[in-house]
Amino acid sequence: HRSRSGGEPAFLGFQGTSMAAPHVAGVVALIKAAGIKEPNAVLEVLQQSARKINDDPFNHFGAGQLDAGNALQLALKGQITFRDFWRWLRDNGYLNPRFWIDGGAVAVLPKMAMVLGSYLLAWWLRNYFPFPWNGFLNAGLIFGSSGLFFLRGLYIFDLPQWPFRVMGSSLSDLGGVIQGSSALNPLFASVILPFVLIALLLGHPQAKWLAVGVSLAMAVTLGISAVIHPTLIWLGSGTIAQAFLGVNALLCLGLGYLALKSATSSRYA
């Protein structure tokens, strides 16, 4: 609440049915959304889910203290049906048709460009260095460019959100996601991660393609980010951030090229 004098934040206490009724109405809406429609059944859920107040000599709380979480759990009876699960998937984010109709798809276009650009770069380099197109390479291209981005905005009631945010982010996004920021972290959005992966995995017959895929994908990702969204933690969103991303995109490309050359030469040696 903002106080009238100076507009400073203030915590104020209110009481009475004018404050209690909207809270109860909101919980009733959650209960009805869970499938319980009959008024007496809704009332029963409200009463059974309320937190009991032991020290209540004047009966201020009636059946107890309102608890939205307990009420919804009781309404769902602790079970999530496949129908409920599908409804949550359908009504949320990228799986909702309205997302695409209402123009929200514009936010996805950069991610799609990063994925497509990563695959095109790998396909083009394959003309010069014949290499196997396997699951490790695909994983590197996906997680280096966009991650499972369609999961990032997914919300399922009562489940932690951080796994969806992590799986829905590319490697260069992870630093910002961990810090709760939309800006990229320079430690993640740079050549550092591809370099570490290549140093660790280049000697492995299969996993090295994961490192190659990540390096090529991050070259594309950082290059696109430098053009459309050059915002970095600590470095701002100006020329310095743009130059940082551009230089690291070139370094990732060069690193991927050298790793690819080394991997194919040792394979056919």
Image (cartoon, rainbow, N blue to C red):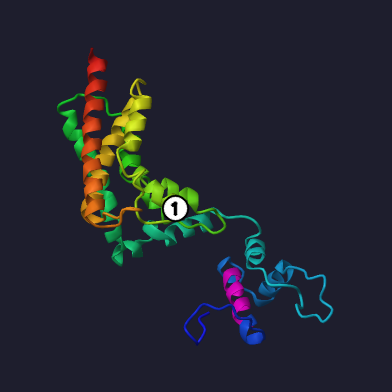
Residue 29 falls within the magenta-colored stretch: yes
Dividing the picture into quadrants, the one containing residue 182 is: bottom left
Residue 104 falls within the magenta-colored stretch: no
Is residue 135 at least partly visible in the picture? no
* Amino acid type, label 1: Gln
Q: Please tell me which residue lies in front, 249 or 43.
A: 249
Tell me the SS state at disc 1. helix
As drawn, 55 above or below 245: below
Give the residue drawn at x 49%, y 51%.
Answer: 162
> What is the x, y in percent for residue 148?
38, 46
User: Which residue corresponds to mark 1?
Assistant: 179
Label 1: how many residues lie within 10 Å, few (<14), some (14-19) or many (20+)?
Answer: few
> What is the x, y in percent for residue 1?
53, 79
| Left or right: 136 as drawn, with respect to 32 | left
Secondary structure mainly formed by the magenta segment = helix
Is residue 80 at least partly visible in the picture? yes
Q: Please tell me which residue lies in front, 51 or 176.
A: 176
